[in-house]
Amino acid sequence: MSSSEIREGDDLLLFLDSKRTFLVKVKKDESFHTHKGYISFNDVIGRPYGGKVKSSLDVDFILFKPTLSDYLRKMRHATQVIYPKDTALIVNYSNIGPGSRIVEAGTGSGVLTSALAHYVRPTGKVYSYEARKERIEKARKNIERTGLMAFIELKEGDVTQRIDEENVDAVILDLATPWLVVPLADQALTVGGSFVSFSPTIEQTVKTTTALTENSFVNVETVECIMRRIRVKEGQTRPETLMIGHTGYITRARKIQKTKLT
């Protein structure tokens, strides 16, 4: 059970407002400097999470224990990352949970990898393939901070050429040519297992759907998730002026048993 008090070495989210947060590691006798003054870590050690601390400029910061969402939002991105709205659908469509075994590609910055690991723990595993070695090391640094590395195996490799695992529960893809992976995903998945692919363009989606229908997959479906924020204020509630429109298409399918010839 995690401590309710802040200790030296803990990760801490300093919350100023909804747009300004700082993910820091608590170190005795050190300080964290912001445009609203500095915060001495000696002043936060021993305090309860959810409390407040004043900066040197007498500005209040709230002391939060970081959530998975906080870690993912603060990760250093070497590639375009999948938005939380799409991640939620991917998790739902893949039907994963504690104990699930997942093949994922590509790893990128490790954002989706970490989210998947969060849901398969404590007995599941994410086998994450990335073709570029330098991205694997960057992803490793990001993932290690979340504390989820024990549930992930980072693998250098091209999933259009090979998938080592068998009888996995889901194959989840975020790469340029997902349709090339479909035959290997067919071999790697257990019967009833889920295939889920995220693609930014409709051309990629069409090729992937065609490949799925030509292999042992049914319930092939593509969706686009669009989220609109609402600015809520008495007498002035309305949708925000700016919004994130298209991010990508999510295609899902399920593997069926191949019919044997008699």
Image (cartoon, rainbow, N blue to C red):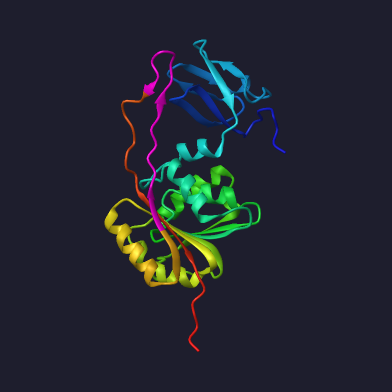
- Regarding residue 116, the answer to whether it shows in the image is yes
At a point 56% along the width and 69% down the height, the residue shown is 167
For the record, the magenta segment spans 221-238
Residue reaching furthest right? 1
Q: Position of residue 168 (x, y in %)?
A: 55, 65
Confirm whether the magenta stretch covers residue 260. Answer: no
Question: Looking at the image, which is closer to me, 250 or 63?
Answer: 250
- Regarding residue 113, the answer to whether it shows in the image is no
In the rendered image of this protein, does residue 115 appear above or below residue 237?
below
In the rendered image of this protein, does residue 79 appear above or below residue 133?
above
Q: Position of residue 214 (x, y in %)?
A: 37, 72
At a point 53% along the width and 25% down the height, the residue shown is 14
At a point 31% along the width and 63% down the height, the residue shown is 207
In the rendered image of this protein, does residue 207 appear above or below residue 74?
below
Question: Looking at the image, which is closer to me, 26 or 146?
Answer: 146
Question: Looking at the image, which is closer to me, 31 or 156?
Answer: 156
Residue reaching furthest top? 58
Q: Position of residue 175 (x, y in %)?
A: 37, 57
- Image mark count: 0
Q: Position of residue 135 (x, y in %)?
A: 41, 53
Q: Quadrant of residue 68?
A: top right
Confirm whether the magenta stretch covers residue 226. Answer: yes
Residue reaching furthest bottom? 262
In the rendered image of this protein, does residue 11 appear above or below residue 234?
below
At a point 49% along the width and 67% down the height, the residue shown is 255
Question: On the rendered structure, is 55 left or right of 20?
Answer: right
| SS majority, magenta | loop
Q: Which quadrant does the N terminus fall into?
A: top right
